[in-house]
Image: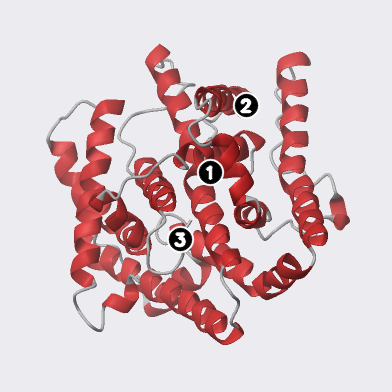
């Protein structure tokens, strides 16, 4: 694996898959209401398809960790990067709100505008939560990097403890819900019970994001061993594992939906699921076989930040026209529609990169 300016092809592929999944989730045109009286077998299939999309943000975190831990650490550069992310979050939050004012006829007073920006208003700019989680990770990264470089055992200890208090806590909630809904038939679901109580320091900061990020660092630490063990060998194993892992998350989603009386979002609620963690690792193994210098994949990977910030604006503009076309709302059309949104977002990002003052917004 070469470093420097040379692209790492499998990382380009992972980032391209991740951003495509993000767009696919946000521009969904088909119904997954499995509780509706109109629900069919196809509705359940579409709900099953949603489960793989839960890997979108975790894939970004995993790749980010891989790239961050392999570099030499420079505190000054890191602080500049940290501050830049915070500034970008507020700038794009403001741009998005202004977009809604001018193109969706939303109305905000100055105070409401400021409050919407400060609270990351749900349904408007809450998608920028990912940048907030990344900032939390970057704040602690100097400590993580120091331990990573100097004491491997303590770093692994941190990842295990973090995993137990996040993914482990989710497993306990899932088991409790299965017990109540499936066995006891009392329809009592358990979403976010903190079983570690006051001893869980990872609650409230999306602690699972640290796990994905640090696993990326461990993947770099053991990269040669992983690469030699899995590349081009028994690829049916991770593929089959993904299918069964998605089935597991699907079953959890159905149980939660039936128990709560509302459709459980397997993407948003599935980020800290053990099933999603398994899928991320399997996608990583599968992508290691990618050896192509595909221009489109490279361009998408190089511009994921811009696409991430821009795509919801494109969706807002495209949705009214798309709805008038009376195109069948199925999985095939959603694949094509997502590709269209992806290309438009990429095109606008590349245009912004041509403008000296604006290119900093998407780099």
| Residue identifier under label 1 | 268
Q: Is residue 134 left or right of residue 323?
A: right
Residue furthest to the top in view is 41
Does dot 1 land on a helix, a strand or a loop? helix
Numbered label attached to residue 51: none
| Residue identifier under label 3 | 2
Assess disc 2: are there few (<14), some (14-19) or many (≥20) residues with their C-alpha within 10 Å of its C-alpha. Answer: many
Percent of width and height locating residue 252: 62, 26
Percent of width and height locating residue 257: 57, 27
Closer to the chain start, of discs 1 and 3, is 3
Pointers 1 and 2 in contact (C-beta within 8 Å): no
Closer to the chain start, of discs 2 and 3, is 3
Closer to the chain start, of discs 1 and 2, is 2
| Camera-nearest label, 2 or 3 | 3
Q: Is residue 83 left or right of residue 325?
A: right
Assess disc 1: are there few (<14), some (14-19) or many (≥20) residues with their C-alpha within 10 Å of its C-alpha. Answer: some
Assess disc 3: are there few (<14), some (14-19) or many (≥20) residues with their C-alpha within 10 Å of its C-alpha. Answer: few
In the displayed structure, 80 sits above or below 29; it is below
Does dot 3 land on a helix, a strand or a loop? loop
In the displayed structure, 204 sits above or below 240; it is below
Percent of width and height locating residue 151: 80, 65
| Residue identifier under label 2 | 252
In the displayed structure, 38 sits above or below 88; it is above
**C-alpha gap between disc 1 and disc 3:** 35 Å
Does dot 2 land on a helix, a strand or a loop? helix
**C-alpha gap between disc 2 and disc 3:** 41 Å
């Amino acid at each position: 694996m070469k470093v420097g300016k040379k692209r790492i092809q499998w990382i380009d592929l992972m980032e391209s898959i991740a951003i495509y999944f993000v767009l696919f989730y946000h521009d969904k045109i088909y119904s997954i209401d499995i509780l509706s009286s109109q629900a069919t077998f196809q509705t359940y299939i579409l709900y099953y398809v949603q489960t793989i999309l839960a890997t979108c943000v975790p894939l970004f975190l995993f790749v980010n960790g891989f790239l961050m831990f392999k570099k030499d650490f420079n505190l000054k550069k890191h602080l500049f990067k940290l501050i830049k992310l915070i500034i970008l979050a507020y700038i794009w939050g403001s741009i998005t709100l202004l977009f809604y004012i001018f193109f969706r006829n939303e109305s905000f007073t100055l105070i409401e505008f400021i409050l919407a920006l400060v609270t990351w208003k749900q349904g408007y700019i809450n998608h920028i939560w990912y940048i907030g989680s990344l900032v939390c990770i970057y704040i602690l990264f100097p400590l993580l990097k120091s331990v990573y470089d100097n004491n491997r055992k303590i770093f692994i200890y941190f990842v295990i403890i973090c995993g137990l208090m996040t993914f482990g806590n989710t497993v306990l909630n899932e088991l409790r819900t299965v017990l109540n809904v499936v066995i006891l038939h009392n329809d009592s679901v358990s979403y976010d019970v903190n079983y570690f109580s006051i001893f869980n320091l990872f609650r409230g900061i999306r602690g699972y994001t640290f796990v994905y990020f640090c696993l990326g660092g461990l993947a770099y630490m053991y990269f040669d061993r992983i690469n030699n063990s899995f590349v081009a060998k028994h690829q049916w194993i991770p593929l089959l594992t993904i299918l069964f892992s998605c089935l597991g998350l699907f079953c959890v989603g159905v149980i939660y939906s039936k128990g709560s009386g509302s459709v459980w979002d397997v993407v948003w609620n599935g980020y800290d699921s053990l099933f999603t963690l398994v899928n991320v690792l399997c996608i990583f193994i599968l992508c290691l076989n990618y050896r192509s210098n595909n221009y489109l994949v490279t361009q998408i990977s190089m511009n994921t930040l811009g696409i991430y910030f821009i795509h919801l604006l494109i969706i807002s503009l495209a949705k009214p026209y798309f709805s008038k076309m009376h195109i069948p709302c199925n999985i095939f059309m959603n694949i094509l529609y997502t590709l269209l949104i992806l290309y438009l977002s990429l095109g606008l990002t590349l245009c912004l990169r041509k403008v000296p003052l604006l290119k900093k917004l998407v780099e």
